[in-house]
Image (tube, rainbow, N blue to C red):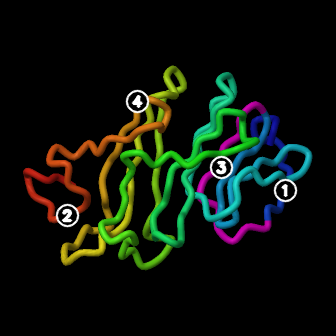
Amino acid sequence: SDDLGNSWLEITLNEERITKMKVINSILYYTSDSGFHKLDNGKKTLLEGFTWGFLVFPKDDIMYVTKYNPTKNITEFYVSKDFGLTFTLKNNGWWNPLKGKAATSSVYDSGVKIASAESNPNIVYATILGEEDDDIDDKNFIGIYKSTNAGETWVNLNPTGETGGPYSSQNPC
């Protein structure tokens, strides 16, 4: 709707699972099981693969996208500084499973939610879901990470530096 809901236009996206949608400057952006897309006079795929979420900063030409890596069973962080023409993986300090591959059983248990303020897109927070391949139940929660330089480097915000469980007052979930 572009008239406050008085009329509606049906759009068929042909996606199995849509994980996030947002309209920015009259363009629909969305992430799904097939990628990060924009819908503006036709569908355009900006990044292929199972994507969980995104942030778009039009005035800075910046886009952040979280995308599942089936080889490692984790979701990773990608940055575009040319408004979606190219994306670069940013994993310096990001969670890397102990044995090179997470014990997460499916793509649906390994998502990442990201947040940032439009006033300062350099500061990004990421809540990472997943299971470390060890004998500890992580409750499908790895931790909260923060970047102060647009994803170039990441810091685990857990006071102990641990990823996942076991959880206690010293290692909060």
**Which residue bears the numbered disc 3?**
21
Mark identifier at residue 74 = none
Q: What residue type is labelled 2?
A: Gly
Q: In 3D space, how far apart are the residues under numbered discs 2 and 3 (Cα atoms)?
A: 32 Å
Residues in magenta, as a range: 14-25
Task: Give the mark toward the camera: 1 or 2.
Answer: 2
Q: Position of residue 135 (x, y in %)?
A: 19, 78
Badge 2 marks a residue whose secondary structure is loop
Mark identifier at residue 165 = 2
**Which residue bears the numbered disc 4?**
148
Rendered residue at 74%/52% (across/down) = 37
Badge 4 marks a residue whose secondary structure is loop
Compare marks 4 and 3 and give the one earlier in the sequence.
Answer: 3
Q: In 3D space, how far apart are the residues under numbered discs 4 and 3 (Cα atoms)?
A: 25 Å
Residue contact at pointers 2 and 4, CB within 8 angstroms: no
- Was residue 20 drawn as part of the magenta stretch in this picture? yes
Q: Residues within 10 Å of mark 1 (few under 14, many from 20)?
A: few
Compare marks 2 and 3 and give the one earlier in the sequence.
Answer: 3
Badge 1 marks a residue whose secondary structure is loop
Q: What residue type is labelled 1?
A: Glu
Rendered residue at 36%/76% (across/down) = 103
Does residue 118 sit above or below 79 in this rendering? above
**Which residue bears the numbered disc 1?**
10
Q: How crowded is mark 4: few (under 14 residues within 10 Å), some or many (20 or more)?
A: some
Q: In 3D space, how far apart are the residues under numbered discs 3 and 1 (Cα atoms)?
A: 15 Å
113 displayed left or right of 102: right
Q: Residues within 10 Å of mark 3 (few under 14, many from 20)?
A: some
Image quadrant in which the N terminus is located:
top right
Compare marks 3 and 1 and give the one earlier in the sequence.
Answer: 1
Q: Where is residue 115 in the image (x, y as percent from the top left)?
A: 47, 39
Q: Position of residue 166 (x, y in %)?
A: 15, 65
Compare marks 1 and 2 and give the one earlier in the sequence.
Answer: 1
